[in-house]
Image (cartoon, helix red, strand yellow):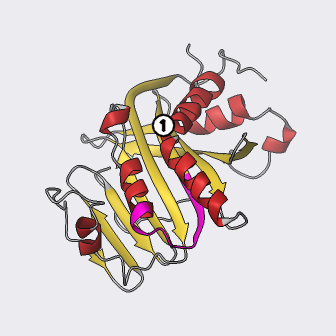
């Protein structure tokens, strides 16, 4: 399942190499979110104190800003960049994972602790959602060119309207034990010096559907997803680096 938009953003065939815009990783932004859909997830019950008292959030973590608390949503953003978003029927754990080792990434353990604390919740699905922004050098329209000239086949269908066609891609793959969806969208990064760099946002979603399985199978799939999260992230990275981002 896709993660819902947060209220506040935490701190911000083969390819033809001859026509491919130059991809570079001098700015490598990677994020991971784990989304749990459960009928028992309720902002009125899962207040900020719940996460500390249950051991999901360590007591020494400091908030980066005042929490957002209402009957419909709770958002906690911590100084270490980890955030928790609770909505009706859904809870999301998010973390920047750029330059972090597997052992340094905390949200999988947090999600597992939440499930352990709420074993009777009616879990409907779980998603392991990696994101990565890859920058493109020199050309402000490089992201659109990469989509329309490299990933899409050229043709007259692109020649329509008064301006160049804009594109994004939504791809779906059926893996052995879950469905993987990948969205590719152009984006712009603003640097501290106000310079803007064109980039591509690769948003992945490993989705485990839990609403149609037995209680025993549900617990097994939750355990599998949360214990295998790093393998899923590596699958995502390998797909990007071997199929979409070939070395020049």
Residue at image location 20% in from the left, 53% down from the top: 79
Q: Is residue 118 above or below residue 221?
A: below
Determine if residue 141 is in view.
Answer: no
Residue at image location 26% in from the left, 59% down from the top: 57
Left or right: residue 68 compared with residue 43: left
Left or right: residue 177 compared with residue 31: right
Q: Which residues are magenta?
A: 116-127
Question: In the displayed image of the protein, which residue is found farthest to the right?
Answer: 156
Q: Is residue 210 above or below residue 71?
A: above
**In the foreground, 39 or 82:** 39
Q: Secondary structure at mark 1?
A: helix
To which residue does mark 1 refer?
Answer: 230
Quadrant where the image shows the N terminus: bottom right
- The residue carrying pointer 1 sits among few (fewer than 14), some (14 to 19) or many (20 or more) residues within 10 Å by Cα, namely some
Quadrant where the image shows the C terminus: top right
Q: Is residue 68 magenta?
A: no
Q: How many marks?
A: 1
Residue at image location 66% in from the left, 25% down from the top: 243
Q: Is residue 124 magenta?
A: yes
Determine if residue 194 is in view.
Answer: yes
Left or right: residue 94 compared with residue 153: left
Q: Position of residue 204 (x, y in %)?
A: 58, 45
Q: Quadrant of residue 219?
A: bottom right
Q: Position of residue 247 (x, y in %)?
A: 55, 15
Left or right: residue 230 compared with residue 170: left
**In the foreground, 11 or 149:** 11
**In the foreground, 132 or 119:** 119
Q: Quadrant of residue 176?
A: top right
**In the foreground, 102 or 12:** 102
Residue at image location 17% in from the left, 56% down from the top: 61
Q: Position of residue 205 (x, y in %)?
A: 59, 49
């Amino acid at each position: 399942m896709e993660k819902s938009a947060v209220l506040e953003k935490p701190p911000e065939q083969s390819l033809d190499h001859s026509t491919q815009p130059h991809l570079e990783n001098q700015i490598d932004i990677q994020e991971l979110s784990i989304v749990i859909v459960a009928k028992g997830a309720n902002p009125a019950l899962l207040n900020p104190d719940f996460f500390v008292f249950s051991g999901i959030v360590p007591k020494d973590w400091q908030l980066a800003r005042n929490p957002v608390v209402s009957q419909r949503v709770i958002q906690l953003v911590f100084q270490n960049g980890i955030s928790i978003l609770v909505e009706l029927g859904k809870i999301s754990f998010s973390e920047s994972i750029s330059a972090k080792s597997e052992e340094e990434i905390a949200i999988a353990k947090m999600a597992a602790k939440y499930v352990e604390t709420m074993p009777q919740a009616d879990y409907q699905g779980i998603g392991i959602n990696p994101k990565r922004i890859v920058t493109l050098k020199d050309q402000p329209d490089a992201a659109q060119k990469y989509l329309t000239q490299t990933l899409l086949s050229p043709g007259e269908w692109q020649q329509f309207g008064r301006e160049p066609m804009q594109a994004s891609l939504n791809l779906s793959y059926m893996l052995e034990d879950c469905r993987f969806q990948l969205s590719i969208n152009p984006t712009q990064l603003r640097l501290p010096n106000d310079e803007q760099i064109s980039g591509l946002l690769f948003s992945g979603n490993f989705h485990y559907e839990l609403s149609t399985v037995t209680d025993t199978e549900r617990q097994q799939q939750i355990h599998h997803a949360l214990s295998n999260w790093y393998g899923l992230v590596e699958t995502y990275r390998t797909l990007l680096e071997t199929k979409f981002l070939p070395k020049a």
